[in-house]
Image: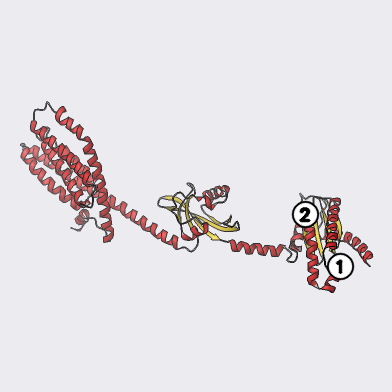
Amino acid sequence: MRPLANLLIPAFKDRNASRNFHLHVDGLIFERIKLVSLLLAASYPVMFAFDFFLLRDLGSIVYRMNLFILHSVCFFASVIFLYIRKKPDFISKRFINYAYIGFYLAAGAAASLNSQLLTGTIAAYVIVMISAAAAFPLRPLHFSIMLVCVHALFLAGLSKVTENYFTLLARQMNSSGAAAVSLLICYSFYMFQKQIFIKEEKLKSKEESFKRLFSMNPSPLLLANLEENKIILMNRQATEFYQTGTGTLDGLNADFIFPALEQKQEILEKLKHNGSIQNYMIEYSDSNGSPKWTMLNFEPVDYMEESCVLIAVSDITNFKKKEEELHRHATVDMLTGIMNRRRGIEILEQQALSQQGHEFTLCFIDINNLKSVNDKYGHNVGDEMIKLICSVISGKISADDIFFRLGGDEFVIIFNKKTPDNARKTWKEITVDFEILNATMQKDFQLSASYGLYHYTPGNPMTAEEIIELADKEMYKEKSMFRAVTI
């Protein structure tokens, strides 16, 4: 008995799921009855012409009148359905569905019984049974009860209008076989709808779980279809981070993720070749124009049967600021703000040892009287003197030149692609500014510095220390002259 029960009543384990499925099926049948009703109503003029014109020479007036009545009843039933379907709350959909399907089965049976007066065929009934089973996924038990009732009446009516016993027996057997086939079709289509519904419910459940996890994630997350340039989902953190507002995502494209179109194309190419992308850094500008850095991770996912990319966003602005600060500490002299010894020597070494190098003139600078100023007025005044001298020099050299502090009162300028004459001309301008400041500012010190030059040409491999030492020797010549004058 159990297999038969499973055949006739395919049940869900969860009652709520079963109820939702049957509501879904009721709605599906209701919409399909609408299509059938539209078809019957639209075809009525053709049926009318068939009944009264094409069959006008038919001798059996009873057959013609029965056929006209059947066509007219189906037409009015369709019109009535199209009217009441706009008021689904007035009568339940399930009641309307069962009433109309029962009516269609009965109409098919009546049409075949009427055919016994002329053609003797039961095709109309068979077609209606199979069509109803395929088009309307009724519960198999309900359809079987409905079919048994109609079929019993059909068999009884068939025995009244068929005189030959063997003809009657053949038609009863054929129609009963068609009824069994239609019940099997009903069960198959019902189970097919059930499987579709279960898969859709699982998909919806996964979608809801995904959305919950998506929204609960503390970091900004986006789900986007980059190929179609549209945003599917954004959690609250992503909305706040990108400042896209609280409106719907309809019409929101994915361009705001990429400041440059080339970045988006690069991401799409990498996704095609690598499948996923980790730690991709992008720099933005916030509403105040300040730099904002993000690290993006891209992971391809399928969402609602659509190929998408899950984008995890990490705000690394503070990290980049600390990194820049550390880099600045590692490359910048804290007192003067110019390049420090470590970075300056590194650049000088690269230029001196490079195979594709270019000429430059190195200027070695030593501040005059710094020790005396420190001893007499203190290191704060000495630091002020150093900063003023660096400020003047920085204002006179070009953007291509390198200026760094070697240590204490010693500094280096790398005049890139310049001859010693060019360097001397610049130094004279620096000296003039020193004299102007000495004449105008009220300080306890005079700005002055000695310098020495060394001209480096490519193809002469030397170390940074060797180049500095040669320029240092030239500086000492001028330093000696300065001391001779000031003593």
Q: At numbered mark 2, what does the secondary structure look like: helix, strand or loop?
A: loop
Q: Give the secondary structure at mark 1.
A: loop
Which badge, 1 or 2, is on the more N-terminal residue?
A: 1
The location of residue 326, given as percent across then percent down, is 67, 65
Residue furthest to the top in view is 57
- Above or below, 414 relative to 77: below
Which numbered dot is residue 415?
none
* Amino acid under disc 2: Asp
- 250 in relation to 63, above or below: below
225 vs 397, left or right, is left
Mark carried by residue 369 = 1
Q: Mark 2 = which residue? A: 401
Q: Horizontal and vertical percent for residue 194?
A: 28, 53
Identified by mark 1, the residue type is Asn
Residue 132 placement, left or right of 222: left
Q: CA distance from mark 1 to mark 2?
A: 26 Å
Q: Is residue 122 visible?
A: no
Up the image or down, 471 lies above or below 459; here it is below
Choose mark 1 or mark 2, whichever is in front: 1
Front-most of residues 371 and 206 = 371
Mark 2 surroundings within 10 Å by alpha-carbon count, few (fewer than 14), some (14 through 19), many (20 or more): some
Residue depicted at 12% across the width and 37% down the height: 69
* Residue 265 visible in the snapshot: yes
* In-front residue for pair 428/454: 428
Q: Quadrant of the C terminus?
A: bottom right
- Mark 1 touching mark 2, by CB under 8 A? no
Q: Residue at x 9, y 37 (%)?
A: 167
Quadrant occupied by the N terminus: bottom left
Whole-percent x, y for residue 189 in the image: 26, 48
Please tell me in which quadrant of the rendered image residue 61 appears: top left
